[in-house]
Amino acid sequence: MAELGVLLTKHLGFHQYDVYGDLLGLLASHPVAPIVMLHHLDVVKPLFPDARSRPSAVRRLFDGPVKLDTAGLMQQSICYDSANRWTVSVAWGFTVLVVRGIMSPREMEMSARTFLNWYRRADYTAYAFNTRPLARSPCQKPVVYYLSSEQREALHGGETTVTRYERWRHPNETRPACRWDITDPDAHLDHIIVLKKPDPRLW
């Protein structure tokens, strides 16, 4: 590359992941770095499960969040609802996960293994990043909300993006009873609205 006059700059946080299957776990915990490219989309599930096809799912992403706030796409924010004892993880422009209990940021920043390694003989230890297994306890399975709409409004003295995330349920999904004395977010939240100020100078 240097011989062609192209200089390479090492930037911490940039990675290339070659995986297939369901990208939810990976993209919901995307590191705080710009998302540059999505490839091999022919071997992954549609980014939005209610989309008619893989291309239409990608189009929803690019026609909405990418145009609205490119720098903020997939950036993860973690917050807590102390009253209900929920952990909330927002991957802006893509999904919101709500989990019972207080999970540390370190745990939430690790990708849940919803995806598979490109090299079928390799297991999760072959990744160049830490992952965590899918929750087995029904009490700790996240409630998933996918982006349904987005717009820009003039709020609080400046431009603000308003994104809405709707609860998505798999046709065969069942949520067994949980014995924890913690409110079930699935029973109380049909949608979540996120307000965010775009920052074009983020990267």
Image: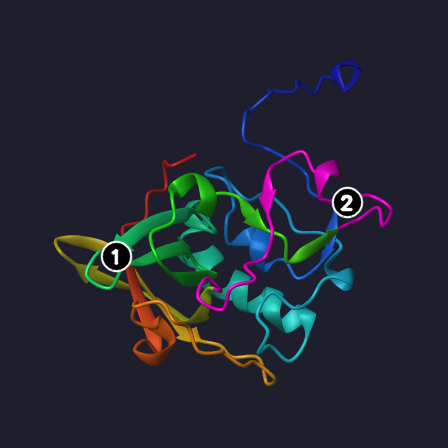
Decide: marks 1, 2 in contact (CB < 8 A)?
no
- Please tell me whether residue 9 is drawn above or below residue 143 in the rendered image: above
Q: How many marks?
A: 2
Q: Closer to the camera: disc 1 or disc 2?
A: 2
Q: Is residue 38 magenta?
A: no
Q: Quadrant of the C terminus?
A: top left
Label 1 sits on what residue type?
Thr
Secondary element at tag 1: strand
Viewer-proximal residue among 42 and 146: 146
State the image coordinates of residue 200 (x, y, percent, origin top left): 36, 42
Residue at (40, 61) in percent of width and height: 99
Viewer-proximal residue among 180 and 128: 180
**Which residue lies most toward the front here?**
179
Residue at (70, 20) in percent of width and height: 6
Q: Is residue 13 left or right of residue 178?
A: right
Between marks 1 and 2, how big is the CA–CA gap? 42 Å
State the image coordinates of residue 5 (x, y, percent, origin top left): 72, 17
Residue 160 shows which numbered tag? 1
Check disc 2 and report the residue beneath it.
Answer: 123
Mark 1 vs mark 2: which is more N-terminal? 2
Write down the region rendered in magenta: 117-141
**Which residue lies most toward the top here?**
3
**Which residue lies most toward the left here?**
157
- Please tell me whether residue 45 is drawn above or below residue 35 in the rendered image: below
Q: Is residue 139 magenta?
A: yes
Residue at (46, 51) in percent of width and height: 73
State the image coordinates of residue 152 (x, y, percent, origin top left): 30, 63
Label 2 sits on what residue type?
Asp
Q: Quadrant of the N terminus?
A: top right
